[in-house]
Image: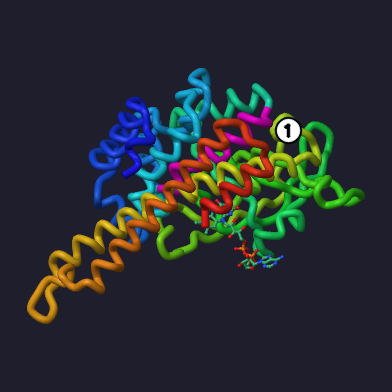
Amino acid sequence: MFEFMLTEEQRKLVLEAAEFVKTKVPKELVLDMDEEKVKYPREYIEALAEANLLGLRFPKSLGGRGLGWAEEVTVIEEIGALGTSLGCLYSLPSIVGEAIHKFGSEYLQEKYLAPTLKGELCTAEGLTEPRGGSDFFGATTRAVRQGDHYVLNGQKRFIVGAEGADYFMVYAKTRDDAPPHESISAFIVDRGPGVEVKHVYGLMGTRGGGTGRVVFRDVKVPVENIIGEEHGASKIFYQMMVPERMTSAAGALGTARAALDVAARYSTKRKAFGKKIKDFQGVNFKIAESLTRLDAARALVYTAARAIDAGIDSGRARRYVSEAKK
Ligand SMILES: Cc1cc2nc3c(=O)[nH]c(=O)nc-3n(C[C@H](O)[C@H](O)[C@H](O)COP(=O)(O)OP(=O)(O)OC[C@H]3O[C@@H](n4cnc5c(N)ncnc54)[C@H](O)[C@@H]3O)c2cc1C
């Protein structure tokens, strides 16, 4: 339905991603993840990197393809057909990469982003805390400067990919004598002494993706691992709403499409009252309505992606991507 909006190159990219999904992700992996036989599918991330499908928006010099959101959402939709766990894990380099690429130093880009896009390092984002996620500026995780490093203490929860992450992007409060939106900083924190993944949640739909609670106890974070300015993470947080919501929205398209495929196919097999249930108008209406809503959702995602690529201001971009995510 939407092919008419895609260029020849974009269509090729969609086929490339669909081929990856079909040939490089064994069905057993998806089933084993759902049964929690897998803690973290590192080989899947490595396969994505080998196919050069990670972080498509980032420059080629860092290992991306220098593409836009218009391209990335089409690939995320294909990957999203594998379910939320694999969709979220695919999106993490794109999400964390946004902060490192837009706000991080060259040192951070070389040390963390480039190896992430090569599949050598796995990443996760630590934003949500046990006391809640919406109230971002109420963060209680703290980082206190001591000479050439910060000492980090606190907890984050619902961290997708925590189990396998080599490093975390973490928001922490860095001062008390200023309003909340001028008191938080963002850091890259290596998995190492004082970093503990406490519990891997068996959340429905996200099992096997290594989602966990991460505890930081007196973790030494070098000053060069700060992303952007000290106390300046509000700018990063607002920008991060774009990749976080855009990737969720595009991934949900793929997941919904796969669910609809299964349901529609089932309606051609299940029989009741002497005929296949697809031959009942009531069932057809449901499928037609779902297809229409899916197309409408895709239209919104494509529009949001193109608006961001065209450089609309961040306030409007956040509004678009938030609507798209719903
Ligand atoms: C698939 C998935 C992946 C995730 N991955 C990550 C991740 O990798 N890293 C990470 O840090 N977090 C992650 N999260 C967590 C996510 O960021 C939080 O769930 C989100 O920020 C909401 O926080 P919460 O769940 O604590 O809900 P709460 O903040 O407790 O909110 C609960 C409810 O209250 C409502 N509410 C909150 N404040 C207000 C208000 N002022 N007025 C009216 N209503 C309000 C909310 O809308 C919500 O319905 C993930 C979540 C999901 C679903």
Q: Which residue matches tag 1?
A: 228
- Give the percent coordinates (x, y) of residue 82: 33, 50
Instruction: Determine whether, in the image, residue 293 is placed left or right of residue 323.
Output: left
Amino acid found under the numbered disc labelled 1: Gly
Q: Count the numbered circles shown.
A: 1
- Quadrant that contains the N terminus: top left
Q: Quadrant of ligand 1?
A: bottom right
- Give the percent coordinates (x, y) of residue 11: 32, 32
Q: Give the range drawn in magenta.
A: 87-104
- Give the percent coordinates (x, y) of residue 207: 41, 59
Q: Is mark 1 on a helix, strand or loop?
A: loop
Residue at 22% in and 72% down = 281
Q: Residue extending furthest right?
A: 177
- Give the percent coordinates (x, y) of residue 87: 42, 48
Residue 67 in the image: above or below residue 254: above
Is residue 95 in the magenta section? yes
Dividing the picture into quadrants, the one containing residue 2 is top left
Instruction: Determine whether, in the image, residue 185 is placed left or right of residue 159.
Output: right
Residue at 78% in and 49% down = 173
Q: Which class describes the residues within 10 Å of circle 1: few (<14), some (14-19), or many (20+)?
A: many
